[in-house]
Amino acid sequence: MSYTVTLGCGCLVYVACHPQTGLAHTRIIETRSPECAIRSHAVGVRIPLWEVLPYEPDDPLVGRRSEPYRRAFGRTAR
């Protein structure tokens, strides 16, 4: 079984899986996105598994650009 997966950077990756176990054994970049800033992403390059996995930081506030919304309790608007 094979799939085409779009990475977060926009590159398209060909992923081939073992038919019985479902494990991905081949991950090759098919198309490089013009917006991709990762220098190692070139057409035909084999990429490691962790580049296909979704990014889930341990700290949910990592990568947040704005301050979290804080409501001012006990104040009234005048």
Image (cartoon, rainbow, N blue to C red):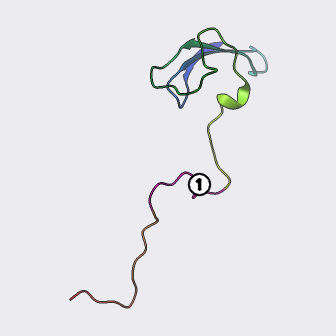
Residue 62 % position (x, y): 59, 54
Residue 72 % position (x, y): 39, 82
Helix, strand or loop status at disc 1: loop
Residue 73 % position (x, y): 40, 86
Residue 19 % position (x, y): 74, 13
- Within the magenta stretch, is there residue 58? no
Residue at the top extreme? 44
Q: Which quadrant is home to the C terminus?
A: bottom left
The foreground one among 42 and 19 is 42
Q: What residue appears at the point 40 percent right and 77 percent down from the top-left corner?
A: 71
- Magenta: main secondary structure: loop
Q: In this view, does 39 lie above or below 73?
A: above
The crowd level at tag 1 (other Cα within 10 Å; few <14, some 14-19, many 20+) is: few
Residue at the right extreme? 21
Figure quadrant of residue 61: bottom right
Q: What residue appears at the point 63 percent right and 8 percent down from the top-left corner?
A: 44
Q: Report the amino acid beneath label 1.
A: Val
Q: From the viewer's perspective, is 50 left or right of 43?
A: right
Residue at the front extreme? 39
The foreground one among 17 and 47 is 47
Please give the residue where the numbered disc 1 appears in the rendered image: 62
The foreground one among 43 and 49 is 43
Q: In this view, does 65 lie above or below 2?
A: below
Q: What residue appears at the point 62 percent right and 41 percent down from the top-left corner?
A: 55
Q: From the viewer's perspective, is 51 left or right of 64?
A: right
Figure quadrant of residue 47: top right
- Within the magenta stretch, is there residue 65? yes
First to last magenta residue range: 59-66
Q: What residue appears at the point 66 percent right and 29 percent down from the top-left corner?
A: 51
